[in-house]
Structure formats: structure tokens, C-alpha cells
Amino acid sequence: MTDSASRRDFLKGAGAAAAASTLPLSMVKLAFADPAQDFTFAYISDSHIQHIKGNEFVRNWDRGLIRAVAETNLLRPKPDFVMFGGDLAQLGTKAELDHGAEMLSKLNYETHMVMGEHDYYLDLGEYWSRLFGDQHYSFDHKGVHFVVLNSILTFDEWTHERWPTPEQRMLEMAALDNPNGSPFMVGEKQREWLRQDLEKVDKKTPLVVFSHSPIQKIYKGWNFWTDDAEEVQALLKPFDKATVIYGHVHQIQYNQIGNIAFHAVMATAWPWPYPESYAQAEQHMPVLTVPMNRADPFFERDATGWQFIDVATGRVAMDYNLYNNTNRRVAFDATKGHPVDTAYQAEADRIPPQDHY
Amino acid sequence: MSKKLLVVACGIIAAVVMVSGLGLRADEFTKDDVDRYQDEFMSVVEKGRKLWGSGDLGTNGVACGQCHPNAANTHPETYPKFQKQLGRVIVFGEMMNWCLQQPLEGQPLALDDPDLIAMEAYARWERRGVALAPGKH
């Protein structure tokens, strides 16, 4: 806590010139009994770099990613690595992926990538993979097992047969509320890979899974959803401490299902409404979640932010550092057995901007 | 047509209507009429939905639906209301115009422009069933 506070102070001071709007990245601290093993990593997600024509890109989204990269480079102590949580591009084109990769290349740290649907459905991840490598993989870092999943796959028929052109397929999936879209899934093949990958890992090892979509079912209409979430959760169940960190939703969410804690990260591009604000939706927002403040569009970078994630006991405590709003801290409470917001969790402690309707 | 002729023509039409009982009375309409009114409305809603998802409204390819899927978080039922950033009470169309000019980097539409009306119809349709709450922030 002291650590994150001082880091925040550092950023507020050192970043005064650069810090005009958001800090749309996540800072992750993993702390263990042996302090020498403590480490941090940063998390940037959902930049939606959007090509207009020629050398023009949507300025607003560009600024979000440029800012995240610049802020991440200012972090002291330095993070061990950076995660990028998917949707680097808006329509998966080479122009967008190249432009995004160019901006990410300014990071002074090793970067691990997660696949998003906006990166994938033009050429089924081919160019993304040429730039960034495998679409699912795992790695170990200072006693933690990390897994990256490509959770935005869907039915073969939808992917390969339904659409006359790759461009149309991309557009159909890119519109969040499009009834012609299709539910996300990890898929049987990747689940089998995950099963084999986790087989080798001691079940006392803290496990952190990164996916683009939530590995839980919140609202199908906007793919705040992974169709085979339960099957994936079953593979994480044997672990004492499992955490899933996901993007896609562009908002604060957290939940606890059995031993698995869930945390969403902010977008650098724009915020999304909570499903409950769509009057026609049947949705299941985790009751634990105290929402982020309603976004104020007059602040271009509002409702994006950055987070410290501190895993002192192998569990996540996430500090949302929000540029235009009061910071938030959502920490795993061992006595309650789930994450809680340390300031706003109780009904009586909530504030009017958290009321979404 | 001269004034005199016009008066005569109107008189004849009025007489024919009254005599033949064509039923052109203000308070009479059939189920077919109601269905037609609804179809007319829904065709405008459908046009509005297309515009809402279009990258061609502004100059940078950004669509309303990128930030507002299903027109969520637009709260049409709360307008007119005091928009604190503009410092006055505005109608829903003015807020849509703000979005056309800022995130979409485009030009505002006239408040009676058929495209703006279509988008308002779409946003309100998605919000159907929600109680009116004029002025609510």
C-alpha cells in the first residue's frame, strides 16, 4: 500500500507535464513472503487504434495509447514486464496493427500480448501473430504461473462460412451490439492445451490467467461473456489461488466464483456503459462490483485509468488510478473470501456518480 | 387557381365528404392505420440504428455505437435537462450534435434534420419502457 501510494505520488509529480488526462494502464504488484521475489507489472488494454486513411488515425484513441506507454515508462520501481490486454486495433488491418505496434515499441519493457476480437477477425490473427507471436501461451515469473488465452474464438461456421468477405466478418464482430455477432469461446482445442499446461504446475502456485473476454458470463448481447467459461473455470479450480484478469469490457468489474477471483482492466480508448444501462438487456453484473463513475464525455480520457495490482498473498489487490475520478482500490478480503472495494463496497458508502441507469 | 374557384372547389369537396360520409373524422382510425403509423415509426428507428453504427456521420470514421452500444448511456428520457458542461438546459438533439462535433469530428445537424430525428427515434426506442425523467442528471 505504501508502495503504491508512493508510486502514485511519483507519477503525479514527475508526470505533471505529461499528465493531462488518463493513466490507462494497470500496475501489478506481486508480493510474497520473500521480498526479493516481489515484483510488479503494468497492464495496458483496449486501445482500438483506428485507421482513417493514408497516415491519419483517430487522434483520440492514439492519444490514449501514447499516454499509457509514456506513463508506464515513468514507473518507479520499474515493472518487470507489461501486459497488453487485446484490441490493439479497431478493424484488424495491417495499418492499425503496425501503428499500434509502433507505439508499443516505445515501451522500455518486455511486453506480452493478448488477442482481442478487433485484432483477429479480419485475417484470423495471421498478421497479429506475425508481429507478436503465439495467440495462447504460458510463462513463469518469480514463482507465479501466468497463462494467456485467446478467448475470442467462436463457432467454425460463423468464422469460416457465414460471411462473403473477411472485411464484412470483421465489421460484424466489431460492432459490440450487433445481433449478427457470435459468442466468444476458448474452444476445446485450447482448453486441452490449458489442461496439459496446468497439469505440470503445483496447485499451491499462484495462477494468473489473462484473457480478452471475461471468463464468466455477464451479458451475452455485448460479449461480456465467454461461452465455455464454466469449462475453463473447472480447469482453474484445483489451484488455491487463481485470478483471471480480462479486458474487453472497458470498465471496472470484479467478482469471485469459488476460488477464482476476476478483475477487469480499463481501456485506453473509451469507456463502455454497464449492461444494466441498456434497458432491454437481461444481464448478470456481478453483485460484488461497485461500478466506476458514469463517464463524462466532455473529458476525453475520462473513465479510463490505471491500476496497481498487489498480490501480497497470491491474491490480487487492484488499485484503480483514475485520472478524472477519485482512485479506487479493490482488494481480496481473506476473511470474506472475495474482492471488496476498500472505500465504497457498503451500499451506504457509494456516491451518486456510481449510480448507472 | 383563382380565389373564387378555390372557394368553390373546397365547398364541393366539403359537401361530398359530408354527404358521402367518407369517415374523415379526427377521432376515427382503424387497426390498419395504427399498424401503418407504427411501421412508419419503426422504419425511421431502423434508419436511426444504421446511422448510429455508421462511420460516415463525422470525418474520422468513429460511430456513435462505438461508445454507446444499443444507444446505452444516452438517457434520452432525461431531456430536456441542464447539461452542466454547456451551462444550460438542452434537448437530446443538442447533445447528439455535441458528439457529432467532438468524438466524431464532424458537423452538427439541424434539430429537424431527418437523420437526427432518426437517431433520436432509435435511442428512444432502445430506451422504451423507462419512465420519463426530465431534468434528471
Image (cartoon, coloured by chain):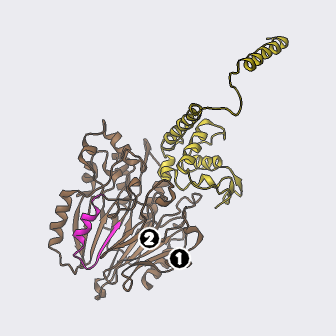
**Numbered mark located on residue A287 in the image:** 2
**Numbered mark located on residue A347 in the image:** 1
Residue shown at the point (49%, 46%) measured from the top left: B63
Q: Is residue A141 above or below residue A69?
A: below
Q: Are marks 1 and 2 on the same chain?
A: yes
Name the quadrant containing residue A250.
bottom left
Tell me how many marks there are: 2
Quadrant of the image containing the N terminus of chain B: top right
Chain in yellow on the image? B
Q: Amino acid at mark 1?
A: Glu
Chain in brown on the image? A
Q: Specify the subunit that label 1 lies on.
A: A
Q: Taking A90 as reference, is A13 left or right? A: right
Percent position of residue A57, x then y? 45, 48
**Label 2 environment density (alpha carbons within 10 Å; few <14, some 14–19, many ≥20):** few
Percent position of residue A211, x then y? 31, 63
Q: Residue furthest right?
A: B4
Q: Which residues are magenta?
A: A227-245
Residue A14 in sight from this viewpoint: yes
Percent position of residue A291, x then y? 49, 68
